[in-house]
Amino acid sequence: SKYTWVDKDTCIACGACGATAPDIYDYDDEGLAEVIFDGDANHGVKAIPEDMHEDMIDACDGCPTDSIIIADEPFNKEG
Ligand code: SF4
């Protein structure tokens, strides 16, 4: 399985990831990106379905600050 998480400490709120993968990434009140898929709330614990992996990888590749992280195991972040 694949999991994803946004490092808000380095996100610059450019808006690219939500445009590329709107079912996975959206923005908080400050415009910083977060993982919203299946209520993830940027914990990085929801497995991203295979048919969404291409969009997820495109968003990761397109992030100018490398703030989108992808891994094979859940992140279990606080948000
Ligand atoms: Fe933040 Fe990267 Fe998404 Fe831009 S593409 S909003 S810098 S996570």
Image (tube, rainbow, N blue to C red):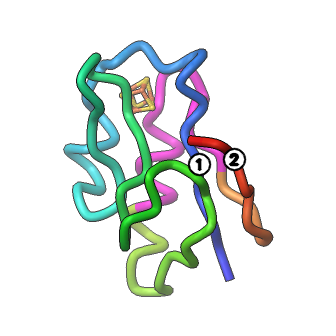
Vertical side of 62 occupied by 22: above or below: below
Name the residue at the right extreme: 73
| Mark 1 crowdedness (10 Å alpha carbons): few <14, some 14-19, many ≥20 | many
Name the side, left or right, on which 66 lies relative to 60: right
**Is residue 59 in the magenta section?**
yes
In the image, residue 28 lies at what x, y percent? 29, 31
**Quadrant position of residue 62:** top left
Q: Quadrant of ligand 1?
A: top left
Q: Which residue carries the number 2 mark?
A: 77
| Disc sitting over residue 5 in the figure | 1
- Confirm or deny contact between disc 2 and disc 1 (CB under 8 A): yes
The residue that appears at 55% across and 73% down in the rendered structure is 46
In the image, residue 69 lies at what x, y percent? 65, 45
| Mark 2 crowdedness (10 Å alpha carbons): few <14, some 14-19, many ≥20 | few
In the image, residue 31 lies at what x, y percent? 26, 22
Image quarter hosting the N terminus: bottom right
Going by the numbered disc 1, the residue's amino acid type is Trp
Please report the bounds of the magenta region as a residue range: 56-69
Name the side, left or right, on which 58 lies relative to 79: left
Name the side, left or right, on which 58 lies relative to 43: left
Going by the numbered disc 2, the residue's amino acid type is Lys
Name the residue at the front extreme: 78
**Is residue 43 in the magenta section?**
no
Name the foreground residue: 9 vs 12. 9
The residue that appears at 50% across and 76% down in the rendered structure is 48
The residue that appears at 37% across and 66% down in the rendered structure is 39
Vertical side of 11 occupied by 24: above or below: below
In the image, residue 79 lies at what x, y percent? 56, 41
